[in-house]
Amino acid sequence: MGVSGIKDLFGLIVGIVYGIAHVVPGVSSGTFLVVFGCYDLVCEAFALKLDVIKKNLMFLIYFAIGTVGGLAGFVFVITYLLAGFEIQTNLFFMGLILGGVPLIVKIATKEEKFKASCVLPFILGLALVVSLFALEKFNAFESGAAQAVGYIYYIKIALFAFVAAVAMVMPGISGAFVLVAFGVYNVFIEALKSLDFSILIPAVIGIAIGIVAGARLILFLLKRYKLIVYSVIIGMVIGSAAPLFPGGLGLNAATFAGVLCLALGGAISLILGKRDSAAK
C-alpha cells in the first residue's frame, strides 16, 4: 500500500473512532483528532478553508465516511458495550487518549519548547474538564428539553446541538456529555436510532454552524498563542481521561480484561500516530 493509501486508510480509521466518540458521554471526539495528529487538518477543513480541503480531499472523504459509519453503525453497539462491558470499554478509550499524549507534546513543541508560562494554562485546561464532569454529578444543568413540542422546542434542540458541536471541536470536552448535562442526550440518541427527522434536521443545522464557528475560533487562537493553546489542550486531554476511570475494579476477570483493553487502546494510538507521521 502506497503512502496515499495509508493516509486514506488512516483517515477512515480516525473517522470511525471520531464518529463513535460522539455517542459516548465523557469521551471527547476532538481529543482523538489531537491524539492521532490530524487535529489542525480537520479543524481547518471544518473552518471551510478551501485550499486545505482541496489538498486533502481524499483523506477528508474517507474521514467523513468513517465518521458517518462510526456514528450510525456504533450507536447501538456502544450502548450495548457500556451496559455489559463498562470497565473494558472505558479503559480502552482511556488507553486511546493517554497513548496519544506523547504525540500531542511532539506536535506542540515542533517549533519551540514549553515554557514556565505554560503551566498555568495546562492546569486551567485540566481543571475545566474535571469540573465539567463534576457538575454532571450534581445535575447542575438539569433543565432538560421543553416538553411541549413547538417551534421553541426545535430552536432549543438547534441551540443545544450548536453548543455540543463547539465542544466536539474542543479537545478534552465531550459533545455527548454536553447533551447529558443539558438533559437532552436521550432525545438525540433516540432520534438517531429512529431517524426522527423532526429532531435531526434542527440538530444538524445547529451542529453545522457550531462546528464551523468552533473550528474558526480554535484556529484563530492557535495562530496567535500556539504554545498556550496546546498547554490548555494537553490539560484538557489528560483531564478527559480521568472521568473514564471505572469503578468496581478488583482482582477479577473484568479488571484483567480491562487492563488489556487499556494497553490495546494505548498501542493503537501510538501505532496510528506513527502511521500518520509516515503518511505526511
Image (cartoon, rainbow, N blue to C red):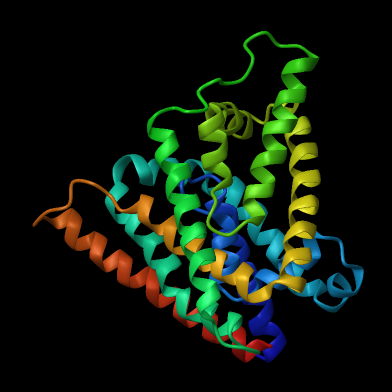
From where the camera sits, is residue 25 visible?
no
Residue appearing at x 58%, y 69% in the figure: 34
Check the image and report above or below for 182 versus 128. Answer: above
Q: Which of 108/147 is in front?
A: 108
**Location of the N terminus (image quadrant):** bottom right
Check the image and report above or below for 239 versus 202. Answer: below
From where the camera sits, is residue 245 visible?
yes
Q: Quadrant of residue 106?
A: bottom right
* Number of dots carrying numbers: 0
Q: Quadrant of residue 207?
A: top right
Q: Residue furthest left?
A: 251
Q: Residue furthest front?
A: 117
**Location of the C terminus (image quadrant):** bottom right
Q: Position of residue 108 (x, y in %)?
A: 59, 80
47 lies left or right of 67? right
Q: Which of 41/67 is in front?
A: 41
Residue appearing at x 61%, y 31% in the figure: 188
28 lies left or right of 160? left
Q: Quadrant of residue 115?
A: bottom right
Check the image and report above or below for 181 versus 142. Answer: below
Q: Position of residue 195 (x, y in %)?
A: 67, 31
Q: Position of residue 254 (x, y in %)?
A: 19, 54
Q: Position of residue 63 (x, y in %)?
A: 69, 65
Residue appearing at x 58%, y 45% in the figure: 175
Q: Residue furthest top?
A: 148
Residue appearing at x 25%, y 60% in the figure: 258
